[in-house]
Image (spheres, rainbow, N blue to C red):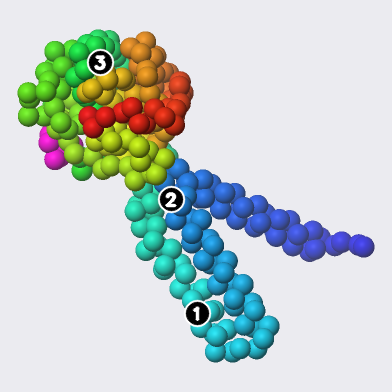
Amino acid sequence: MDFDSADIIYYLRSGLEILIITVVSYYLLRALERISAGGKLRGVTVILAMVVIAWMGARAMQLHAITWLLQAGIGISTLVVAVVFQPELRRLFTRMGGIFPNQDLSSNAAVIGHLGEAISYMAARRIGALIVFERNDRLDDYVTSSQLDCEITTKVLTTIFWKDTPLHDGAMIIRGGRIAAAGVILPLTNNPEYRGLSGTRHRAGIGISEYTDALVLVISEETGIISMSDRGQFTTELTRQDVELILTREFRAGGRRGHRTERLSPMPQNESEKEVKK
């Protein structure tokens, strides 16, 4: 078979379209899966597949009224998907805003020593803590709810999270190497993978890392275990050295990129049952 230039251009264009659709669909599905939309996605996919199969059967049997009704249902599926995935789409668009880094995170590097010392102190004494590091996604909505502007020192960190202080139950947000807010209420995760976590701090830490690209450190009030949440992934049983290494890599080596930190030790399935309410 002979191909002229028009045929070659047509096939190249078609192949390019297929490639673009495949890549976009793949990364969109992966993004939705990471933000806890996997269950909904599978359910909606099954329903749409059943509707399409029913439409094809009705069309083959020349059931015109049913065919028209099912075809109209397929046409409004976009609206249905937008309603069903409204929370996940909002998170996805928020994430997309962080594709182009808009701030230098290296100023946080100067406080790594203070953070390591404070975290070690609180973990040894089982003082619960929830520390959120802002990356590229702005946390203005949370900062304005309980705004501060003070220097990070070991004494300040331990004082804020001391059990008798008014701000100890909420989260601390660190922006640009300074404490931007404390006593902040964060959204809780709805990911069924972490349903065994009864601790509000842990669920809030995972929740804010699902909504944004923030890096979160959590100290359990009952066990003193140090954990980390990064883009919805939860790592537990960290040491002071682990925390300092993670923060050093984040704020010195890759501060401008806001990249995913290395996951040191994944949380075992039965570990969630050991976590407590704080």
Q: Which mark is residue 123?
A: 3
Q: Are marks 2 and 1 in contact (CB under 8 Å)?
A: no
The answer for how far apart the CA atoms under marks 2 and 1 are is 25 Å
Give the quadrant of residue 246: top left
Residue at image mark 1: 72
- Figure check: 69 above or below 19: below
- Figure check: 166 above or below 15: above
Q: Is label 2 in a helix, a strand or a loop? A: loop
Front residue of 259 and 155: 155
The answer for how far apart the CA atoms under marks 3 and 2 are is 33 Å
Residue at image mark 2: 37
Tell which circle, 1 or 3, labels the residue nearer the N-terminal end.
Answer: 1
Main structural element of the magenta stretch: helix, strand or loop? loop
Name the residue at 26% across, 29% down: 276
The answer for how far apart the CA atoms under marks 1 and 3 are is 58 Å
x, y percent for residue 263: 46, 24
Front residue of 158 and 95: 158
Name the residue at 23% across, 39% down: 186
- The amino acid pointed to by label 2 is Ala
- The amino acid pointed to by label 3 is Ala
Residue 96 magenta-highlighted? no
Disc nearest the viewer among 2 and 1: 2
Give the quadrant of residue 76: bottom left
Q: Is residue 137 visible?
A: no
Disc nearest the viewer among 1 and 3: 3
Tell which circle, 3 or 2, labels the residue nearer the N-terminal end.
Answer: 2
The quarter of the picture where the N terminus appears is bottom right
Q: Residues within 10 Å of mark 3 (few under 14, many from 20)?
A: many
In this rendering, position of residue 79 left or right of residue 58: left
Q: Which residues are magenta?
A: 143-147
